Image: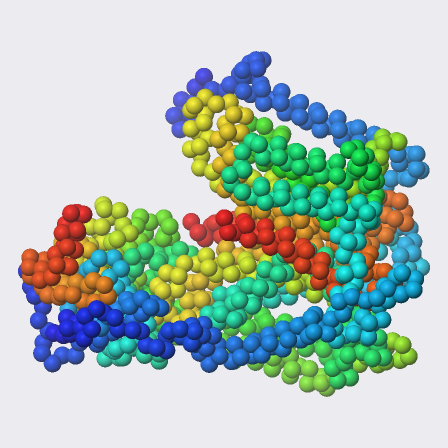
Amino acid sequence: MPIASSTDPRLTAPRAAPRKRIRLSWSDPVFRSIVWQVLIIGVIAAIVWYLAANTHRNLAARRIATGFEFLSRNASIPISESPIAYDPSVSTYGDALIIGILNTLKVAVIGVVLATILGTVIGIARLSHNWLVAKLAAVYVEVLRDVPVLLQLLFWYTLLQTLPGPKQSLHIGSAVFLSNRGIKIPLLVWQPAHSWALLAFAAGLVGTWVYARRARRRQEATGARPVVWPAALALLVALPVAVWAALGAPFHLELPVLRGFNFQGGGLISPEYGALLIGLVIYTASYIAEIVRSGIQAVAIGQWEAGEALGLSRAQVMRRIVLPQALRVIIPPMTSQYLNLTKNSSLAVAIGYQDVVSIANTTLNQTGQAIEGIAYIMAVYLTISLAISLFMNWYNAHIALVER
Amino acid sequence: MSDIAAPASDPSGAIRPPAIMLGPWGWARANLFNSWISTAVTLAIGYLLLRGITGFFDWAIVHAVWSVPLNAAGTPDATACQTAKGTGACWAVIADKYRFILFGRYPYDQQWRPAICVLLFIGLFIVSAMRRFWRRELALIWLGTLAAIGVLMWGGILGLSFVQQDSWGGLPITLILSTFGLALAFPLAVLVALGRRSTNLPAVKMICVVYVELIRGVPLISLLFMASVMFPLFMPEGLNFDKLLRAQIAFILFAAAYLAEVVRGGLQALPKGQAEAADALGLSYWHKTGRIILPQALRLVIPPLVNTFIGFFKDTSLVLIIGIFDLLTAGKVAMSEPAWQGFSTEIHIVLAIIYFAFCFAMSKYSRGR
Amino acid sequence: MSQAETTSHFVAPPGAPPAILLDRVNKWYGQMHVLRDVSLSVAEKERVVVCGPSGSGKSTMIRCINRLETHQQGRIVVDGTELTDDTRALDTIRREVGMVFQSFNLFPHLTILENCTLAPIWVRKMPKAEAEELAMSYLTRVKIPEQAKKYPGQLSGGQQQRVAIARALCMKPKIMLFDEPTSALDPEMIKEVLDTMIGLAETGMTMVCVTHEMGFARQVADRVVFMDRGEIVESGPPNDLFENPQTDRLQLFLSQILRGH
């Protein structure tokens, strides 16, 4: 190997390992691996090409034009629940498919929040010193994990449907009505004062954060930690209330009222959405409970003892020692449960909630654009999965940095 | 200094712990009433539990209707159930429909055949769970049993009448989808896991990664839709597979991706020394993998493998959405029968018990080994 | 304090209240009687070594002193405060009593320095800079100041146990408890930990130490307590006890220990 011609020894290139020559012989591992790979890729490419050719021929025979031109066509799909304006007579398939995404997100985001709360409560309950509480939590986990989520969804859906009609609905006062049309709840009539109060709350959030940071600095400097919660209470509650009161304290609820055979006004949680949410939350919570339990158990008892022996209170041990360690064990499987909940929300199609899959399914049945419809479903979920695994990679890298 | 114990008043050391710590009362004190909060919680939950259990007992046993007479037309007369509705369960719907729920539309007088199949499946699971059958012969047992199940279900030979696949249904479909799915997905999963671990075949590794991540990133239902609407487009004209077979293929592809990740976990957990020792002995790649690495790696991942299998077993219920007649679909069809409108809760409970029994047995096994 | 003084038998000044007093303490795990009428009094600045076969209740006893275990009968008074269910009494005692565990129990997610400053900051309400200064001074005393920014997982067992000692000292305790501090260590690391403990003994710290290190006991202990089957069988100055065991149980134990070394 030629040494770099420069005379300066610092510029001498580090000596590279000698490059291996590939021999055209079956006993040469590099040659063999290349042959294998070419072979395998060739076979897979051939299969894909064969299927693609068949598909092309079949589509031509059925006179189906491929492409996404149908997205701008008028969709006559009736959509009962939509977060954005939708009119089947003018809106397009594209609009309908966007509504599908929004509906999926609506159930997934709220489901994730509720399942986390319920699952954490049950997971901690399983570790309770109270035998009855621990056993009850264990039975919950055991039973709900071992029954298919689809069966649970159908159960909740039929249960909500067998509720009495609007006229005989179960109700709490004259505000909340539970009937086979869903759950009617009062809606706040939104006014500018509310937006300002919300803005004040956001400002309070920032203020609390700044205050907590200052409290921390002060503690580092003097040792005494100023109490944060009164200021936080003032900023988060008193400030928005004051803003709202200063603007005349408008508060008007739109109550659901029974007119004829159905309710008018107020907000509605449809039986489809309700059943999907309840089913997914209850099912996923049973998995989350196990994750939380094993996460807490993963922190050795010695950590508690060491913390307490140093004079830290139980709350301080929990906050400063146990929780940071438990979260590392909990967060990775927890995110995969969030992904599972999101994927399971596709079972909405079985009970008629119009999510991504349900609307795509209707679209492909109406237009015959099977490939595009399924590609759309997969693209949506793959995007969500990818986003979650990017977050996971970032999180793991972050944790690894702290660890070493 | 007084640190030597005073000559023990009781040299045998048989001082009993205070009575308050012993016996059922001591246990209850320690586990149910050890603080006032705990006591309050115990009492509140105990009360609710008692109310719930007695309420359920009243509904499910005391006021339940167990059977109903047939009316003139030969169909069951559900009047008794209708009157008891709300206060008592109507188990008569199960008494009337259980064979439909279990075996679907399989010819009524031939339903002993799927019944035997279910028993064969259960026997197969039990045999596979036992350590002393973990030998090469197990593969033969599987092949033989699955073949016997095929013969029993289809018939057409040995004097059995031929039964079309369209009329199969109920529990056997659930078991077929999950068991055949597992049996065929498993070898594929092992190959994919090995491919993903391979260091000198980057292109193969790439394909395996894309396959696994693609399948795991999308919901199963999208794969089932693909099987039911897109699969026919892939096939040459004139050739078409049965719907069940298409769903089965989707299932295998789905299961293999998840199983591959479990197997990969086992391969990763295995100490490097094992592979090095095999290399030092001069074993070829396939010998090394087949005789040294895989048997150990698979043994390591039995609990997660069983958990994955439980997941598939439950997931077979999704075929309801593409209209395949599995256990859940059979139950749902039974619910929609006009005579039995409004007794879906009872059917849901029975279906849940059947699924639970299978899954619980498997999860107990995976934890209790 | 010179070496000669360290080994001399400690005599508590008459009338001084004991730093630790155990009075007929009993404890059961279910039916199992693990502490039987244990009575022990430790004077201020006294160094007591507790030894005994495994399962003899010595760890349980030492863990009762800062109430990681609760006793069920008898009295335990530490530094003038009786241990009861009262949490305030417990808080006071835990500040004054430092503990070192067999398995170190360092907090793996915190650096060595953070391990040492956590309790001074949150319990003693010490400014961060001051706590860090204090921590560095103790880390210097246990001879690992250069490891302050590392995490426990990066240290050897002996280093970890020395950090654990420094961490306990950062709370400026009046009493130090050691629960088999060298049992989980490789032989070559035992000495560095024992040296640290000997150094600590020379400062006049009140120490109760569960250990099988007879050399350490001879050099440092004012008194050795031998426990077996939940009771204190013999106690006295190390040389008396080791040369003239009065009971068969101690003889047997000593012969096993010596054979083991």
Left/right placement of residue B5 relative to residue A322 reads left
Residue at x-position 45% and y-position 53%: A402
Q: Is residue B287 above or below residue A150?
A: above
How many badges with numbers are in the image?
0
Q: Which of the 4 image quadrants contains residue B128? A: top right
Residue at x-position 86% and y-position 48%: A364
Q: Is residue C95 visible?
A: no
Left/right placement of residue C255 relative to residue B30 reads left
Residue C207 coordinates in the image, percent (x, y):
20, 66
Which residue is at the front of the view, A329 or A127? A127
Quadrant position of the N terminus of chain C in the picture: bottom left
Q: Is residue A29 visible?
A: yes
Residue at x-position 90% and y-position 49%: A366
Q: Is residue A282 above or below residue B118?
A: below
Q: Which of the 4 image quadrants contains residue B278? A: top left
Residue C49 coordinates in the image, percent (x, y):
17, 62
Residue at x-position 53% and y-position 60%: A292
Q: Is residue B331 above or below residue B225?
A: below
Q: Which of the 4 image quadrants contains residue B86? A: bottom right
Residue A220 coordinates in the image, percent (x, y):
40, 68
Residue A106 coordinates in the image, percent (x, y):
73, 62
Q: Is residue A54 above or below residue B333?
A: above
Left/right placement of residue B149 relative to residue B109 reads left
Q: How is the image coloured?
A: rainbow
Which residue is at the front of the view, A79 or A118? A118
